[in-house]
Image: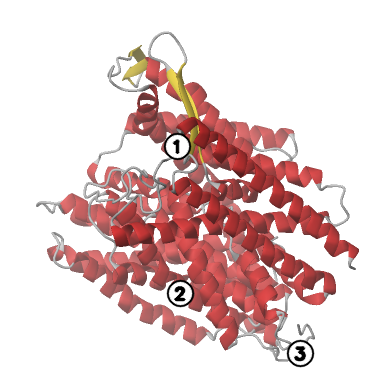
Amino acid sequence: MNTTVTAHPKEITVRGIILGVLITLIFTAAQVYLGLKVGLTFATSIPAAVISMALLRFAKSATIQENNIVQTIASAAGTLASVIFVLPGLIIIGWWKDVPFFITFGACAIGGVLGVMYTMPLRRALVSQSSLPYPEGVAAAEVLRVGTSSREGAAEGAAGLWAVILGSVTSALYAAGAASKFLAGEISAYFKVNSSTGVSGMAGSSSLALVGAGHLMGITVGIAMFFGLFLAWGVGVPILSTFQIDSFWPLHLVAAHPDPALSVEDYAEGIRSSQIRFIGAGAIGMAAIWTIGKLILPVWGGLMSALEAGRARKAGTYDLPRSEHDLPVWIVGLVILISMVPAGWLLSGFLAGGPLTDLALPLVIAGVLYIIVAGLLAAAVCGYMAGLIGSSNSPVSGIAILTVLGAAVIVGMIGYKFTGPNVETALIAFTLMVTTVVLAVAVIGNDNLQDLKTGQLVDATPWKQQVGLIIGVLAGAVVVPLTLNLLNNVWGFPGDPNFHAIDVKGGTLNAPQAVLISTLAKGAIGGHLPLGYLGIGCVVGILLIAIDEGLRLSSAGKFSLPPLGVGLAIYLPASVTAPVVVGAVAGWIFVKLIAKMKTKDIADRLGVLIASGFIVGESLFNVVYAGLIAGTKNPDIIAIPTPTPAGLGMLLALGIGLVIIVALYIWAAGQAKKIGDTI
């Protein structure tokens, strides 16, 4: 592979675009499924870079900059899929029965393009002339440089591709085993905790994707989620199943009287879904807002530095090197202005024929102005946070919460006197659509600056990266509505009044952020918030923030308990959270065991790629599986004639899953040693 520095290296190529788009299509579908299942997405830059280097190494003319364009295109998959934190809300409130392609594509595409345009002028101040760490951007650049600069790098690139493949294949086969009823889909146990009505339990999905997500999130988040599990199932469910809350202020408990026909499992899960998850929602909201609040001063300082740097550049006269060439400012301004036309058309089309037709003009004007202003602020804030804490750790949920509340206030003020059937639902739906566009702006702005940091470190041309990211946005925008609609038709979402899922036994997808954000929109416009449980959650969130800050101060930043991770674990079913905790602990043990190896860094990176493969393999299997169910209308399309008995199925799922994880970790350590021995 060509690593020679030239004045005009090969960057945007037909083969690179094709490869980047293919990776984007695959990873976006996987991200949509994972985000709806667990409320989290993962960064796709490093797996995409590894795949690109492994495939393009056979082309002698391939360059590090060409591989960088591939990962830039594919990075859109890890960020644009975040719109599913809002979009399912339109189904949950009953506005959509199915997901319309063109409206959803338009919201993703318009928001994504604006995200690139809004953050482009911030590149010099926040990337090339900034001391911000950009953890994921620096990591991706390191992977590209190592993979294209040495024999060891080439060998690691080949091993990395195999790590993704092996992780994907084993994860897909494991998921197929659960879907076929050969393996238990869930390992669970529910029990009484006292002589009256108190119950509790624990469950974990047979999911290597969730284990992989835990590995990628790390032990700190894993501990936070374990603490959230304890609060939900060790404290909340036992108390609320024993006592009912008679009044919230002052808090008054009376004896609970559950339906005697309910099983222990149904009673415990009923308590979780009707009460505990709203406590978790309050904790998530408080943690997200706190995270945003802590970053206000650094973000403001960074933006002021950006403006100052811009003034200083204008005062000087010098020729810019290729690595400083952005899209011309006039093109950026023109694209932003032109984008307002389809944005207005999108919002007016969304309202056409509905109960708000007479209010369409003021609502569309307000919506477009909100996208311009809130989108610009969100992109700048998220872009700075990408540099400060990384794209994956950026509190996108907090941005979405603030955005939906702001949009709800404006939309509610315009339509508060308007009456008629379904008016309230229409106002909530319009609020969610505007929020979707702004969120797309924010997350792609987040991604753009992270990618530009990678580009700076590998001597890439900024404007070519910006074009590459737009290509990735358009490719991802095609996949999001198709995948979302497929999953809605097969499994559906909680609370959907038009629920029409084919596989009812498979359970609904959690879509935790979408449920929370649609609940907030309903409450802000119609006053339907479950304030009692949300209030308790806010108090829990404040206590968690205090614990986290205390740990950080007392340990000089060495220890923490991320409140957002705790809140998510309270909110989500244990079946989703428990495997994530297992993955975090497994990854931590793996890193400890390889700590004395000379090639521990290689082994660590291969472990990350195996975890990424776990996510991609299972997620893609479930998307394909959903397609089979939708095509045949048969939820048992691959089920074996005689399902394995429940107890044996759980043992098999536990044993086979453990063997796969241990075997692939051993393989990663062995490959790392082999790579080191050949150099």
Do the CB atoms of the residues marked 3 and 1 lie less than 8 Å apart? no
Give the alpha-carbon distance from disc 1 to disc 2, as whole Å: 32 Å
Vertical arrangement, residue 625 with respect to residue 646, above or below? below
Badge number at residue 261: none
Density class for disc 1 (Cα within 10 Å; few <14, some 14-19, many ≥20) is: many
Q: Residue farthest to the front?
A: 641
Q: Amino acid at mark 2?
A: Ala
At x 39%, y 26%, the residue is 265
Vertical arrangement, residue 140 with respect to residue 342, above or below? above
> Considering only order in the chain, which callout, 1 or 3, is on the residue closer to the N terminus?
3
Q: Amino acid at mark 3?
A: Thr
Name the side, left or right, on which 667 lies relative to 521.
right
Closer to the eye: label 3 or 1: 1
Q: Which residue is mark 3?
A: 6
Secondary element under disc 3, as helix, strand or loop, is loop
Q: Which residue is mark 2?
A: 475
Q: Foreground residue, 119 or 142?
A: 142
Do the CB atoms of the residues marked 1 and 2 lie less than 8 Å apart? no
Residue 120: percent from the left, percent from the top?
Answer: 55, 75
Give the alpha-carbon distance from disc 3 to disc 1, as whole Å: 53 Å
> Considering only order in the chain, which callout, 2 or 3, is on the residue closer to the N terminus?
3
Residue 38: percent from the left, percent from the top?
Answer: 48, 47
Q: Amino acid at mark 1?
A: Pro
Residue 465: percent from the left, percent from the top?
Answer: 59, 79
Q: Quadrant of residue 630?
A: bottom left
At x 31%, y 34%, the residue is 530
Q: Residue farthest to the top?
A: 195
Name the side, left or right, on which 624 lies relative to 292.
left
Secondary element under disc 2, as helix, strand or loop, is helix
